[in-house]
Image (cartoon, helix red, strand yellow):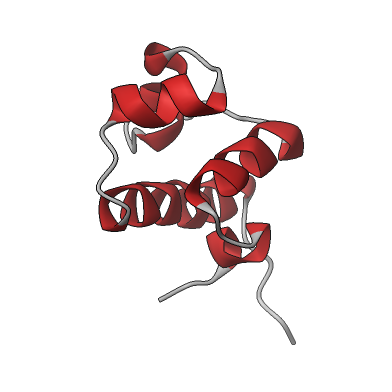
Amino acid sequence: MAQIHDENYYYDIVRKNIKKFRKEKGYTLQKLSEKAMMSMDYLAEIESEKRKKSFSIAVLGRIADVLEIDIDCFFKKE
């Protein structure tokens, strides 16, 4: 039987990947937030493991566009 995870499990995978790809691209939170047209505070909350801020697929899509990656890369668990 497949294990069913709570929503935090999936958000945590996405959060870690956003941060990983941002750093690989050499972007600061400020640079990514400006390019994605969202506040730096909001982006910091999305990336934060302490705050459980939810976010929409549209926001995730904008971040993926700026980082020039496919949105599905955010869902890959390492």
> Which image quarter: residue 50?
top left
Outermost residue on the bottom side: it is: 1
Question: Looking at the image, which residue is at 56% across and 60% down?
Answer: 69
- Visible in this render: residue 38? yes
28 horizontally vs 73: left or right: left
Q: Position of residue 67 (x, y in %)?
A: 49, 49
- Visible in this render: residue 51? no
Question: Looking at the image, which residue is at 60% across and 29% down?
Answer: 54
Question: Looking at the image, which residue is at 48% across and 57% down?
Answer: 13
30 horizontally vs 64: left or right: left
> Which image quarter: residue 78?
bottom left
59 horizontally vs 22: left or right: right
50 horizontally vs 2: left or right: left
Position of residue 73 relative to residue 61, above or below, is below
> Which image quarter: residue 33?
top left
Q: Position of residue 6 (x, y in %)?
A: 62, 52
Position of residue 28 relative to residue 5, above or below, is above
Q: Which quadrant of the figure contains the N terminus?
A: bottom right
Q: Nearer the viewer, residue 34 or 73?
A: 34
